Image (tube, coloured by chain):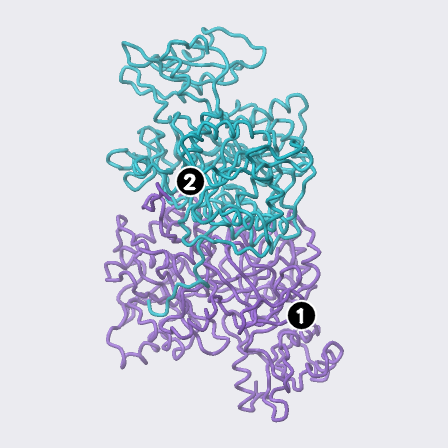
Chain colours: A cyan, B purple
Amino acid sequence: MEGMVVCSANYVPLTPISFLERAAFVYGQRVSMVFGDTRYLWKETHERCIRLASALSQLGITRGDIVAAVAPNIPELYELQFGVPMTGAVLCALNPKLNATTLAVKLQQLEAKAIFVDYEFTKVVLEALGSLSQTKNNSPVLILIQENHTNAFSAIPINFRLDYHALLATGKLDFDISYPKSECDPISICYTSGSTGKPKGVIYSHRAAYLNSLGEIFRIGMRQKPVFLWTVDMFRCNGWCFPWTMAALGGTNICLRDVTGTAILNSIFLHDVTLFCGPPILLSKIAETLAVDPQPLPQKVDVIVAGAGALPEPQIQTKLSELGFNITCAYGMTEALGPVTSRTIRRSCHDETSQLDHEDARTRIREGTHSLIIEGADVKHPTTMESVPADGKTVGQIMFRSNTLMSGYLKNAQATEEAFQGGWYRTKDLGVKHPDGYIQMKDRAIDVINCGGEIVSSLEIEDVIIRHPMVSEVAVVGRPDELLGETPCAFVKLKDGCCIVEEEIMDICASHLPEHMRPKSVFFGELPGNSTGKVQKFVLRDRLIKGDGKSL
Amino acid sequence: MEGMVVCSANYVPLTPISFLERAAFVYGQRVSMVFGDTRYLWKETHERCIRLASALSQLGITRGDIVAAVAPNIPELYELQFGVPMTGAVLCALNPKLNATTLAVKLQQLEAKAIFVDYEFTKVVLEALGSLSQTKNNSPVLILIQENHTNAFSAIPINFRLDYHALLATGKLDFDISYPKSECDPISICYTSGSTGKPKGVIYSHRAAYLNSLGEIFRIGMRQKPVFLWTVDMFRCNGWCFPWTMAALGGTNICLRDVTGTAILNSIFLHDVTLFCGPPILLSKIAETLAVDPQPLPQKVDVIVAGAGALPEPQIQTKLSELGFNITCAYGMTEALGPVTSRTIRRSCHDETSQLDHEDARTRIREGTHSLIIEGADVKHPTTMESVPADGKTVGQIMFRSNTLMSGYLKNAQATEEAFQGGWYRTKDLGVKHPDGYIQMKDRAIDVINCGGEIVSSLEIEDVIIRHPMVSEVAVVGRPDELLGETPCAFVKLKDGCCIVEEEIMDICASHLPEHMRPKSVFFGELPGNSTGKVQKFVLRDRLIKGDGKSL
């Protein structure tokens, strides 16, 4: 159309770096970060990130390089979420609880130019790098993160070039930020949590990160200046993009090195926390702490839970909401930068609208609807790509289309192609669509049990067993069976001090499930979980194949 | 980076059409529209827009065509905001209060393929088209909009092909939406309000419209499902993008054919309105109505005011906020799709945080800070493009960078180039930057008075005169002067039943303004305003040049 132009005034590549720039301008004097005695304003966080970018630049880090970090939820890891992209490089925050072998696999794939390592995790990183040294020439620059006051090392350990604070001191404030040339340029890499045992490096673009950060605001209608407690891991989907969301809203970040029920509750009272997120197990942790000393919250606190793991029983949910927690349940994955669909299941006593929608109250196992920035969420036949009827019964694969999806898997074009086959992202989760458009997950495709040709949902069995008052956690997987192919097998963790026998589990299943869905065997013990509380079913399956279920 | 792809799963051109698609899915059973006895659900609005697009398509409307509309804030104009872009065409809603001559100029430039005309405005449109017929061959398809129950015409008048409802009946629900090929494709054209007397057609892109619709949500931290009263003209910046914002949030639109103080208040009580917007004169209208029967609102009501025209006196603002209005003052322009910077000046008694920030209370003439989606707002020297110091004193030109700026002026490449010269959008407004980053407008560049070499701000003089308790409106312009070039001249409208003489205005100026800023002449009478209440200063200047100021 005559008269139209695209120029630097009206087209600026979308990037969350903009949020920090604006935060320094609009919220400069507000507190951005609290961690123990450490406290920064947005003006300071902005300056620290610029210095960090400048210092990394001087170390030779440049556009397209990968910078890794192994650290818990501390301010330095928060600053890296901005400082690394400001150089044009790509941040990969890694789970600090990985063992050296697993870490080595990822580090080999990443070929990071620099690695930031928290003082607690130097040993495992050095061990991982040691196992790589024979095959790699370009060793990365290692930067140590020490807490201001802990003084964990009197001298920088060997192999480390310098520490974070010394690095920052070399940075300059007049650094020229390397904005992305295209908004589709990569900003970060996050590894999938590995419930399938084959972790992949998921690449995020600036555009996806920007739009998903905004999407998080809409999910629960966040207002300006929230106080966010860091209970979700920053290495997990870049902390569900909340580092960037907080800059967008001029919020305050409360960092925690260790996430316990007591630490969460103390922070809520001390810092007027308004929001935190993470796996459902967070709710159980809080409920346990509150069981000792139940006290109403000083203000409404929004909680978004997502990831595998059962929600606590309805009675506990009700109790938490009566104390002031506003619980939203979400469904998503690393490939989607975090939650995609969600619904608020329990409104707190402080909420403006304390009554539950009829819809919400109707059932407790619905993934809800897709949030504002998502272009499409549907349940489709994986071959024909046709939508299943919205009858609440026909099972298909849950699929998404969105500007907030990954750009692909690092160095794995084949997996990328498979994931996006048909023009939609294939979650591999099975689900149904209800007449009101709500999507309900029936099972992860990998967790479906094929029992003599009958497709059995492990989730539905788990949902029955968890109702037993003495059961704390449960996971159901398929056990190889000569006759039927597979039969359901339940692994149960009991609450502290509780003791029941297999028959009690069988009984509760018998009264709620059809014959073919009832577990044929039950094992008791701890469940193998990853750092987000997600049960690693592949480990359980392995054990069953090796026949050592009893020694779980 | 190896493994990255851009495909239809992870890259969908940004367009507000998506908001309507999602609204039908997520908010399908919620009320989208109320207009008298007419009431639609989001599912119905979605279907009506699809039928509209299908019907337009069958009329031959296709990608890149322009469709014009001349109508007040009625549901049909709302549906056109989606239905026209769904065909790939570009909507231009025109001010229905234009006279035939002014309308003809715009219609000639637009070369619209179809024009929708509200029954009240058929005469002026036909007159305008009549004046064009000698020069144009392709006459547009004319579609009449009649209200369901008014039955204004027993038969469709000559020249009109059919009426809106008959058109809709021809549309099909299985229509294949023409999504934009690029998100930079045009979605609409809005004419500038013409305070300079030279209206321009401002082109908006799908990307800008999408992002600005989100920006409106952040400005006041809107939650889901607001109830929006249509007091801002839909032809003005596409109603500040609120048609799209309401679809994004599943809100309810309350349409009004005539915007009066009584109509606004009745709607607030009847429909639980949570938000409305428009020029500052809205507040005066409400204050006048409430003066007769002051009653507290049943809920907090957000009001965003922007555009020229003075705010009511502080006492009236306080009274309105005590009754429940939460007033936000914004600054923007057609080229920026509506408001860019804003600040909340008065919080309602219902607001969670009823205390004003110190900052906010400090002064009442600050434009505040730029909203979340804006990339940059600055005050710069127009030649060197350097930022002025943030000292609250140094005057420069206010400039913006944003993905929410226009694509350019229709068929006016030169004006587009001038507006974006230097990589920023030049507002032509003069302003200063305060130490806290707040921007304050000093004057529209065009409204500055050059008085013997002294640059005098007409706004500052107006701000003094409006304080006189009997003054209702005031506009100050430069009057040609042989000796000084220009001298300030005040045009004053008094409140009903009030009577004062020139000396009283001179006195209040003498006690608050330096000698050279005091008006040398004062005229009393009605002020020429456009439909948004913006005083047309160019009309006043014309009159002064022609020497007929007295006959104002």
Q: Residues within 10 Å of mark 1 (few under 14, many from 20)?
A: few
Q: Is residue B545 left or right of residue B417?
A: right
Q: What is the x, y in percent for residue A498?
A: 56, 10
Front of the two marks 1 and 2: 1
Q: What is the x, y in percent for residue B435?
A: 67, 62
B247 to B345, vertically: above or below: above
- Residue shown at 41% from the left, 37% from the top: A202
Q: Secondary structure at mark 2?
A: strand
Q: Residues within 10 Å of mark 2 (few under 14, many from 20)?
A: many
Q: What is the x, y in percent for residue A393?
A: 33, 28
Question: Which of the chains bears the disc numbered 1?
Answer: B
Q: Amino acid at mark 1?
A: Lys
Residue A370 numbered mark, or none: 2
Residue B143 numbered mark, or none: none
A229 to B61, vertically: above or below: above
- Both labels 1 and 2 in a single chain: no
Question: Which of the chains bears the disc numbered 2?
Answer: A
Q: Nearer the viewer, residue B409 or B130?
A: B409
Q: Residue furthest right?
A: B511
Q: Is residue B366 left or right of residue A532?
A: right
Q: Nearer the viewer, residue B325 or B539?
A: B539
- Is residue B118 visible from the viewing direction of this image? no
Task: Kindly identify which residue carries mark 1.
Answer: B393
Q: Amino acid at mark 2?
A: His
Q: What is the x, y in percent for residue A302?
A: 57, 37
A218 to A362, vertically: above or below: below
Q: Secondary structure at mark 1?
A: loop
